[in-house]
Image: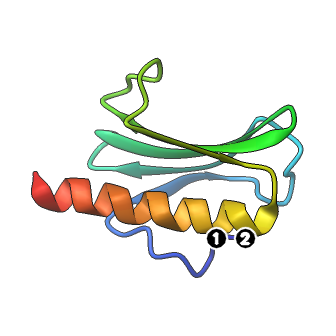
Amino acid sequence: MFDDIDFSPGIVTYNVTQYLDQEDIFQVAYRDDAYVLDVGWYRKEFAVYVIKDSDWQNPVLEKRCMELDKLYELVQECSLYVRKLISES
């Protein structure tokens, strides 16, 4: 589903995009898990989180949507955001 998004320098660590009805769908780890991009299904909407230093209670960025087309856009946007954070550090 996200095959044509460039997640570098991240590594896809979880991908079950064929099952979009479960909570954990997709995850990318950056810099030994310093940042994580996480995609999930939460009841009636998709959520994309950017997590720093395993602080799941305080995401650096959180985006939500209900449509698959929008989900793709949000994942791409969050991937670019993480790449920017990494390049600035």
Q: Residue at x 64, y 70 (%)?
A: 2
Instruction: Please name the amino acid that badge 1 sits on.
Output: Phe
- Percent position (x, y) of residue 36? 42, 43
Would residue 38 be found to the left or right of residue 33 on screen? right
Q: Quadrant of residue 47?
A: top right
Answer above or below: position of 67 versus 41.
below
Instruction: Please name the amino acid that badge 2 sits on.
Output: Met
| Mark 2 neighbour density, 10 Å: few (under 14) some (14–19) many (20 or more) | few
Q: Quadrant of residue 50?
A: top left
- In the rendered image, the quadrant that contains the N terminus is bottom right
Would residue 9 be found to the left or right of residue 70 on screen? left
- Percent position (x, y) of residue 51? 41, 36
Residue picked out by circle 1:
2
Determine the secondary structure under disc 2. loop
Depth check: 22 or 14 in front? 22
Answer above or below: position of 50 versus 43.
below
Q: Residue at x 26, y 49 (%)?
A: 31
- Percent position (x, y) of residue 58? 41, 22
| Mark 1 neighbour density, 10 Å: few (under 14) some (14–19) many (20 or more) | some
Residue picked out by circle 2:
1
Q: How is the image coloured?
A: rainbow
Determine the secondary structure under disc 1. loop
Q: Extreme top residue here? A: 57
Q: Residue at x 37, y 36 (%)?
A: 60
Q: Residue at x 75, y 69 (%)?
A: 69
Would residue 70 be found to the left or right of residue 18 on screen? left
Do tag 2 and tag 1 residues touch (Cβ < 8 Å)?
Answer: yes
